[in-house]
Image (cartoon, grey):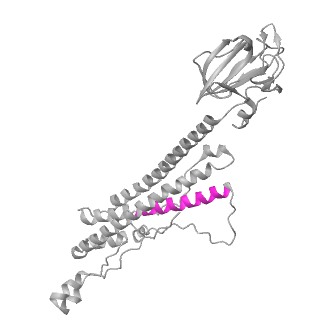
Amino acid sequence: MNHHASFRPAPKLCAITAVAAFALTMGAAAEATATPTVNVSESPTWTQVRAVKAQPEVKELQVSVLERTVAELSAKAEQVRAEATAATAAFVDAVYELPDVSARDTITAPTVEPLQPIVALGAGLANPVPAPATASTDDTTDEPTPDTPEARVELAATTQAAVEGELAQTELKVAETLAQIRYLTGPLEDVEPFQASVDAVAKRVAAEAETRLQEQTARKQAEETARLAAIEEARWANPGTGRISDVFGPRPVICSDGGCSSPFHGGTDVATGCDAPIFAARRGTVVYAGYDGTHGNFVLIDHGDGIQTGYAHITVGGIFVGVGQWVGTGQHIANSGTTGASDGCHLHFEVYENGNQVDPQPFMWARGSNIG
C-alpha cells in the first residue's frame, strides 16, 4: 500500500489580539487595560474557541483558518478512504487464500484503536481531537515476515486496521473543526450541542468501515462464484467406475441376443457390474434416450462445440433422463446393464467430435479426467 503524506497544518499564524489592534490607534496608554491574548490556531481547544468567540476581531480570522483546515483534512479523508477500500479488499483477498475455507464465513471488521472522545464542559475542554497521523505499517523488527497465507492475512489485517484508524481520526477531526466553525458563527454560547454532533460521527465512521467490509466480501464471493463456474465449465467427470474391459479400436465381433457388434469397437468399455450408476461426463442436453439397436438402451448427450458422449447397454428401466433435458457434469443419468450386443453388464462409453467417433481415453485424459 502506498503511504500518503501525513496532514501538515499551514504555518502558524501570528497571534492577533484585541489589545494589539487597539494599541495601533490609541497608543501606549491603552495597553494598561488590554484584554488577554487569544491565539489563532489550526487545531484549537474548545476552551480557546469559546474565548475567541468573545473577540470579534480574532473570531473572523479563526473561522478562516478553520475553513482552510477543513478543506485540507477533507481532501486527506478522501485519499485515505480510497486506501481503506484497497486495504479492505486486500484483507478479504488474503482470507480467501487460506487453506481453511471456513475462515471466509467469519471475516470481521478490524479492531481500530478507540477514537479520541469528545468531552463535555470541564477540564477536558483543553483536549481537542488530535490531528490525524499517517498510518504506518512498517516492520521495525529484523525478523523477516514468513510468506504464508496466515502471515499474509495478519499483515493485511494490520494494514487495514491502521488505515481505518487513520480515516476515523481524520473524519472525526473534520467533524470537530466544522462544529467549531458553526459554534463561532452561530448565536449559541453552549458548546455541548456541537460536541454531541461530533460524537455522532464516530458511530457513522464505524458503520462505514463495516459497509466497506461487506462490499468487499460480496465482491470476492462473486469472483469466487465465477471462478468455480469457470472450472465447472471446463470440468469433465468419470462416466463410470470399474476396470477397463475393452478399448477403442479393432476387435472380434461379439454376438448376443441383442445382435452382433461391429468389428471396430467405437468406444471404451468399463466393467461396472450390473445396475451401477452411470454419470454424465459433462453438462449438456440429452439428444437421445432410448433403445438403439446393438447399443441397447442408450443415452446421447450434446455438450456443444461439436462434442457428444454416448452411454450404451443401460439396464432395462435404467434411463433416468429424457430428450431435451439439461444435465449437469457428473449427474446420475442411468444404471449399467447388458442390453443390446453385450455379453455382460458394463458401460460402453463413446465420444463424438463433429459426428466422428474418437478414442474416449486420450480425449478424457486431455481434459483432466479418467474413465473407469
> Which quadrant of the view contains residue 14?
bottom left
Spot occupied by residue 234 in the image (x, y as percentages of width and height): 63, 36
**Is 212 placed above or below 271 here?**
below
Residue 17 x/y as whole percent: 26, 81
Which quadrant, please, contains the C terminus? top right
Quadrant location of residue 361?
top right
State the residue at coordinates (32%, 65%).
Answer: 180
Q: Residue furthest bottom?
A: 28
Q: Main secondary structure of the magenta part?
A: helix
Given residues 22 and 7, the one toward you in this image is 7
Question: Left or right: where does residue 115 sit relative to residue 16?
Answer: right
Q: Is residue 9 above or below residue 339?
A: below
From the viewer's side, name the closer residue of 15 and 311. 311
The relative height of residue 100 versus residue 133 in the rendered view (above or below) is: above
Span colored in magenta: 150-173
Which of the pair 74/123 is nearer the observer? 74
Q: Position of residue 333 (x, y in %)?
A: 68, 20
Is residue 161 covered in magenta?
Answer: yes
Residue at point 49%, 57% (across, down):
84
| Res 216 visible | yes
- Can the viewer see residue 119 in this picture? no
* Viewer-side residue, 244 vs 330: 244
